[in-house]
Amino acid sequence: MNFDDLIQGFPDLTTTGLAQGSIYALVALGYTLVYGVLRLINFAHSEVFMFGTFAALWTWGLMGYDSNSARPDLGTALLLVLVSLVVASLFSGGVAMVVEAVAYRPLRKRNAPPLVFLISAIGASFVLAELMGAFTERRQQGIPGLLPGEPLFSAGGWTVYPLQLATVVVALAVMFALDWFVSKTRFGRGIRAVAQDADTAALMGVNKGRVIALVFLLGGLLAGVAAVFYSMKQGNTRFNVGFLMGLKAFSAAVLGGIGNLRGALVGGLLLGLVESYGAALFGSNWTNVIAFVVLLVLLMFRPTGLLGESLGRARA
Amino acid sequence: MTTETVKKQRWKLNLRDRFQDMPKPARIAAMVVFVVLLYLLPTKAFYENLGFPIPMGSGYLPLYTTGSDMAGVLFQCGYYILLALGLNVVLGYAGLLDLGFFGFFAVGAYTVALLTSPESKLITEYNWLESPWPWLLTVPIAIALAMLSGVLLGWPTLRLRGDYLAIVTLGFAEIIRIVAKNQDWILNGDRGIPSVGHPPGTWPDGEPIFELEFTPYYWLVLTVIIGVIFLIRNLANSRVGRAWVAIREDEDAAELMGVPTFKFKLWAFAIGAAIGGLSGSLWAGQANFVNSATFSLENSILVLAAVLLGGAGSIGGAILGGFLVIYLPEWLRSVGDVFGWPTQVQVGNIHIDVSPTSLRFVIFGALLIVVMIYRPQGLWPNRRRAAELKDRQKEVAPVE
């Protein structure tokens, strides 16, 4: 227990926690969207995220930036980030839709029980991770530093880096856009209808198959955005990075109340903060254990998460 | 056409029924012969006399894993079969999805390692033990501790819904691994615990039976498996087993009918964990060295794949599955070695490792999807569970 570190580093820990938490929240939204509509833990979502990190890496590689390059100037860096955001989210979205079509749609047609879905999802996750593993020789791959490394500003004991600011701002922007999309647009109404009652929605003329594909696409897009920022923060990626991220993001989704979009945001940020403070308190080796203990304790006292489960029920 | 298919089915039925119709002594004799054959599996001569044509000079022997020690492969199959049998109780009988089953294996292995190794910190640093314990004495302790950890994990989590349970158990296995990796007080992190004790016993000439040779370990694990099969069969046919099936089919209805569901779910968890711990203690007795790297998540998934490929809820299925997930990649590798399957393929300047051991998770992953789509009841299904799945398919046709 190291309370001094916690108190002295409190502002910095908060910024790191929020930046990390926004990444969790973005991935958690993918879990929550799919769960809200299908009542299914999309186990393969973590690999969708992992493919996003590699898409970003390859994009930068094609544009001439690998882990040995010098930091580009700000304009180039922003361009690189922007391009990789587009490419990675499209790539992740595509992977997510392929997973849906191959591993879930045939099961839906057979009215399989939930357990069967979950196992098929585990299968899909293994295929994706191991294919990437075989393709990259299971090696860790370095990612270039893009955004400037010096602090954006620093006052007293509080420093903020450009990457942290960019992460939080972009994540929040994307989440507001999603919130607007789900609550205001026609497609969003379709999603909410299917989440409330899939069969009735289908009778009312909602194309259920298309709504489900759309939900997977949205989750994939968000995972791609998360993957870009995760790669820049981590400085490397590997075929198995998805697993831990998936576990954390799912925990975040459950913390906030799975199926609830705003819950995913709250859960993600909370998990990021708790981890950041916990790492200062107990040592960074224990970060993952802390995340799980928090999840376990919360589930015991509030099994539906902080904000409760709802996608269809007006709140989202 | 149609008569042919009917005939085929009748023949299949006959095989099963004919065995049941045999007089009891004949059935027992047949089982004994089968079991003796199982004990002969690690010997090379067995495969040479199987009667399959052997291509001359190729070094290939049908069914034999030329690439690695056959007895070693069979021992590994053995402890995976035990794990699959344990998970089968939890998942197949009670219908609880446990994704971190290997965590109990870790508990069993570490218990044995700590108590039997002369270099364990319990002896060298804390002086809790005077000298290392014999292996045999630590096995019951390993089982008891695994069972206890099952109860401790089950107590708070079994009240959760199925999919939350999956994540929490997954987290449990990860926590065990991280704790084992990070802390230095007892488990010694990545450096692990060396010189773990072996099972007792000596040959007539005074040489110890259980050393580095795999064959005796295979015989030991086979004997344990046979014992566990009897235990599980009796449990499944008892009041406890009926309660598990009731919980699996409809938990609320079972509760209303007076089945104490929470208690029986906890029992399923504890018994499954105990078998997992037993498997871990057998493995530790052979492995000689235990560290956290052994307990990665892939293993939990492999056990899960074994149970589901074989057929959840069926003992034969668990055995078949546990055997296949280990034996198949090893066998494919041996066959590949003999017939020149490339281990690497070069695309541009990227080398892709295409050996069966490297690609096995891709194959298992794909197999899981395919099996779930076309044969969700598994390869050797439990009749009742297959019927449950069939019923569901007939229910409401989903609207697309």
Image (cartoon, grey):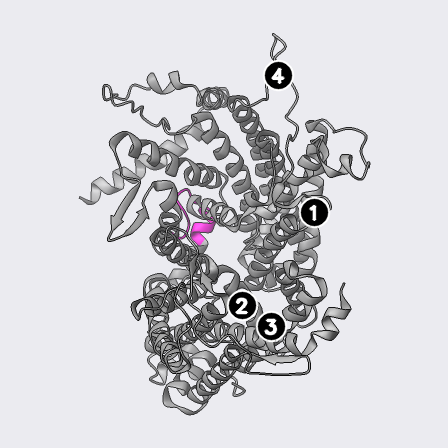
Q: Identify the element where label 4 is drawn.
A: loop
- Tag 1: amino acid: Asp
* Mark 1 / mark 4, whichever is N-terminal: 1
Reading the image, the residue beneath label 2 is A250
Residue found at x 43% / y 43%? B310
Same chain for marks 2 and 4? no
- Tag 3: amino acid: Gly
Residue that protrudes farthest toward the bottom in the picture: A184
Reading the image, the residue beneath label 4 is B208
Task: Please give the range of residues in magenta.
Answer: B375-387
Question: Magenta span: helix, strand or loop, mainly?
Answer: loop
Q: In terms of image quadrants, where is residue B209? A: top right
Which of labels 3 and 1 is toward the front?
A: 1
Residue B139 seen in the current view = yes
Q: Identify the element where label 3 is drawn.
A: helix
Reading the image, the residue beneath label 3 is A272
- Tag 4: amino acid: Pro
The answer to whether the residue labelled 2 contacts the one labelled 4, judged by CB atoms less than 8 Å apart, is no
* Mark 3 / mark 2, whichever is N-terminal: 2
Nearer the observer, B390 or B138: B138
Residue B257: x %, y % from top left: 64, 59
Rounded to the nearest whole Å, what is the CA distance between mark 3 and mark 1? 27 Å
A82, above or below A282, in the image: below
Residue found at x 42% / y 57%? A239
**Is A121 displayed left or right of B260 in the figure?**
left
Reading the image, the residue beneath label 1 is B184
Nearer the observer, A73 or B189: A73
Nearer the observer, A85 or A307: A85
